[in-house]
Amino acid sequence: MAHELTLIPGDGIGPEITAVTVDVIKHAGADINWEVVEAGMAALEKYHDPLPQNVIDSIARNKVALKGPLTTPVGKGFRSINVALRKEFELYVNQRPAKTFTGIKSIYFDHIDIIIFRENLEEFYSGIEHYIDSSKTAAETIGIITKRGSERIIRYAFEHARNFDRKKITLVHKANILKFTGGLFLDVGREIAKEYPDIEFSDKIVDNMAMQMVMNPYQFDVVVTTNLFGDILSDLASGLVGGLGLAPGANIGDGIGIFEAVHGSAPDIAGQNVANPCAVILAAVMMLEYIGEKDAARRIEKAVANVIARGTDVTRDINIHSTVGTKEMGAAIIKELDSIE
Ligand code: NAD
């Protein structure tokens, strides 16, 4: 039976790269009926709201969405669409893989394969902040970490490790200084780890973690951490494998997931057929795994890897001399799919 999924083409390069992605998914054999809805600038122009109710209703109904990047309108009064979606659907997991692709220039050329699970709702991203005095010489941000919030992200990371045959989890914190918030997160992690004796568990203080990731990233497999540290470390991890151009991400809650590229709407190159479609294609790979279309996911990931490794049908962000565009790279990935069992 066909999967009913929500598609938000997005702004800027979004429509170009999601169109290619939809074609790639179709050729991989996954049976999907897309419900296409508009958010961002397109929705603002039509409905005077960057996140109209029909988008929320569609995601609530279908439970899974593939989202192109959205331009955040400049000016007061507009909520961040991404933050609004996370809150609306309690998407407490932010999952960001960082994987080496042969053919991508980066500091490390060997096999890096790290998945970072970042808590997505609590701590310094709750928006509880203000100036303490009227002359604005001091400010305060309150970061609340709860046992429930910690349990569900840490458990999600352990379950993922078990289901995807990962061996190790590193919990990252700053419990030596943030004795209560960091301490709570660490204590919860140690308790949950006892339920998963098949998975090696250790913890690292965030500053040491940052250094270790640069010095020896190969020691890491699955990483779980709080919101702010996860934000920073997941970009660091992307940097280890060649930047954001190939970085997919997922925001996941209980029974609901929104999948997208990490990069934005790139207005500087929109409509020129030069954007790299791979980050959103790899986000679709995560989405296909999530909905159980594991074979299509595996084949698409391999096709992307093969095309990048060959280096002839890649966009100019991968090879500066390339004249290959978004559509042509998509076509090369589709052709490659035919040779993958
Ligand atoms: P950006 O990621 O859109 O662009 C940064 C640079 O990377 C630009 O030079 C761009 O051309 C390049 N780039 C990005 N994606 C590319 C691709 N697929 N192929 C080739 N080059 C690519 O970041 P920005 O310029 O800071 O943001 C633009 C808009 O996107 C803003 O309105 C921002 O709020 C929004 N944004 C949205 C999301 C999201 O929806 N998840 C994420 C980040 C930024």
Image: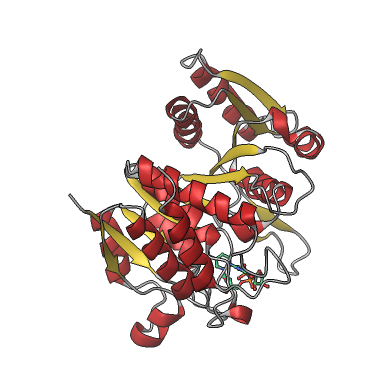
- The answer to which image quadrant residue 131 occupies is bottom right
Q: Is residue 168 above or below residue 65?
A: above
Q: Position of residue 334 (x, y in %)?
A: 43, 60
Q: Position of residue 270 (x, y in %)?
A: 56, 80
Which of 47 and 294 lies nearest the eye of the viewer? Answer: 294
Colour basis: secondary structure
Which of 240 and 40 lies nearest the eye of the viewer? Answer: 240
- The residue depicted at 32 percent of the width and 68 percent of the height is 55
- The residue depicted at 54 percent of the width and 78 percent of the height is 273
- The residue depicted at 58 percent of the width and 28 percent of the height is 184
Answer yes or no: is residue 205 visible: no
> Which quarter of the frame holds ligand 1?
bottom right
Q: In the displayed orientation, state which residue is furthest to the bottom.
A: 45
Answer yes or no: is residue 161 visible: yes
- In this rendering, position of residue 236 left or right of residue 297: right
- In this rendering, position of residue 74 left or right of residue 135: left
- The answer to which image quadrant residue 104 occupies is bottom right
- The residue depicted at 66 percent of the width and 43 percent of the height is 229
Q: In the displayed orientation, state which residue is furthest to the front.
A: 339
Q: Is residue 49 above or below residue 235?
A: below
Q: Position of residue 289 (x, y in %)?
A: 39, 43
Total numbered labels: 0
- In this rendering, position of residue 96 left or right of residue 300: right
Q: In the displayed orientation, state which residue is furthest to the left.
A: 1
Q: Position of residue 231 (x, y in %)?
A: 63, 49
- The answer to which image quadrant residue 181 occupies is top right
The quadrant the C terminus occupies is top left
